[in-house]
Image (tube, rainbow, N blue to C red):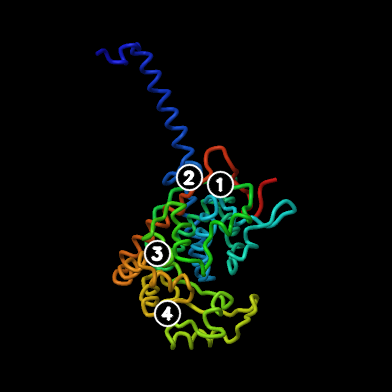
């Protein structure tokens, strides 16, 4: 049988090849890619890294905030920096949701953005700043360097009404938590790995006291419960007060597997932490991570990449915000 190519002259085949190549380039450019800013802003990723390091040495807790930002932004519809938008007359900010309670250090995202604007105006998106700062924050916390793709654009909208549908609560069932992560492409092992981010930072007493009062949750280690009561001495803590407990008291600012060792010893802060041990689908991964820190970090990195690439806005959609907390005028 004659080949279909014989219907075209050599010059026609050449033109078709060039058109196909141009189309490929157009679509490839609109997708995420490594070193997206290599030509438009060659030092973009280095500037983010410099600022993350500088901010870490001034305010160590920023490193934890960068990781939280990625989770709370990328779980809701898209990795599009919608979490950063302030409330306006037209729409309320996602920051006002109870699911985003305790999030902070947003002002330092603007510090990074200003440094980028000075170098390359109107070029680097706030959505990419969220992802790159998380990548560099992980390193500051002793975790692995993760190659993250860039090329996202910023949302013009907040999605406050959708936050509760996408971000699991600390006392949701494990099956619900797993389903939320699966909806963005993260499997069970990846979910257990991402929850390992609880090994750094702290939790406000507002989210703990239901395990302590009026009676102590029997799944809590008694000595640990005593420590938690010392940190949270009243069943009605003030949300504005600095009343916190750390999930990992051994290495509280290191992204390691101590979290898994703790929850195997009934020393998890949140109900979701304890459920990782009691649920038969997640328990094997808890054991695996508790026994191998390197394996935990590799799976954490893999899952974070998947989350960071959730439905990005790219191409000619969205915008590149000049200031991350509000849309361009």
Residue at 46 percent of width and 34 percent of height: 27
User: Of callouts 4 and 2, which one flags the residue occurring earlier in the amino acid sequence?
Assistant: 2
Question: Disc 4 vs disc 3: Cβ atoms closer than 8 Å?
Answer: no
Disc 3: which residue: 192
**180 above or below 57?**
above
Mark 3 vs mark 2: in front: 3
Disc 2: which residue: 37
Q: CA distance from mark 4 to mark 2?
A: 44 Å
Question: Which labelled disc corresponds to residue 120?
Answer: 1
User: Of callouts 3 and 2, which one flags the residue occurring earlier in the amino acid sequence?
Assistant: 2
Question: Disc 2 vs disc 1: Cβ atoms closer than 8 Å?
Answer: yes
Q: CA distance from mark 4 to mark 1?
A: 47 Å
Q: Secondary structure at mark 1?
A: loop
Residue at 40 percent of width and 27 percent of height: 21
Question: Which labelled disc corresponds to residue 267?
Answer: 4
Q: Secondary structure at mark 2?
A: loop
Residue at 70 percent of width and 45 percent of height: 329
Front-most of 189 and 79? 189
């Amino acid at each position: 049988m004659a080949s279909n190519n014989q219907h075209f002259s050599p010059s026609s085949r050449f033109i078709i090849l060039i058109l196909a190549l141009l189309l490929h380039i157009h679509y490839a450019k609109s997708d995420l890619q490594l070193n997206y800013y290599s030509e438009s802003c060659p030092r973009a990723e280095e500037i983010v890294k410099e600022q993350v390091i500088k901010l870490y040495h001034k305010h160590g807790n920023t490193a934890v905030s960068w990781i939280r930002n990625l989770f709370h932004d990328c779980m809701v519809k898209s990795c599009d920096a919608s979490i950063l938008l302030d409330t306006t007359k037209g729409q309320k900010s996602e920051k006002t949701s109870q699911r985003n309670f305790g999030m902070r250090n947003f002002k330092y995202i603007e510090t990074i953005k200003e440094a980028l604007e000075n170098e390359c105006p109107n070029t680097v998106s706030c959505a990419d700043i969220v992802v790159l700062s998380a990548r560099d924050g992980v390193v500051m916390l002793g975790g692995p360097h993760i190659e993250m793709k860039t090329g996202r654009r910023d949302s013009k909208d907040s999605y406050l009404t959708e936050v509760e549908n996408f971000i699991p609560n600390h006392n949701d069932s494990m099956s619900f938590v797993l389903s939320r992560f699966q909806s963005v492409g993260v499997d069970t092992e990846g979910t257990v790995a991402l929850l390992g981010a609880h090994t750094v930072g702290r939790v406000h007493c507002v989210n703990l006291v239901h395990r302590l009062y009026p009676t102590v949750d029997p799944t809590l280690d008694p000595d640990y419960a005593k420590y938690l009561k010392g940190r949270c001495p009243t069943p009605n803590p003030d949300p504005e007060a600095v009343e916190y407990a750390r999930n990992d008291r051994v290495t509280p600012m290191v992204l390691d597997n101590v979290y898994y060792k703790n929850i195997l010893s009934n020393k998890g802060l949140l109900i979701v932490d304890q459920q990782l041990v009691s649920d038969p689908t997640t328990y094997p991964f808890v054991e695996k991570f508790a026994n191998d820190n390197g394996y935990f970090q590799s799976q954490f990195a893999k899952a974070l990449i998947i989350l960071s690439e959730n439905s990005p806005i790219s191409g000619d959609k969205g915008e590149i915000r000049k200031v991350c907390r509000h849309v361009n005028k």
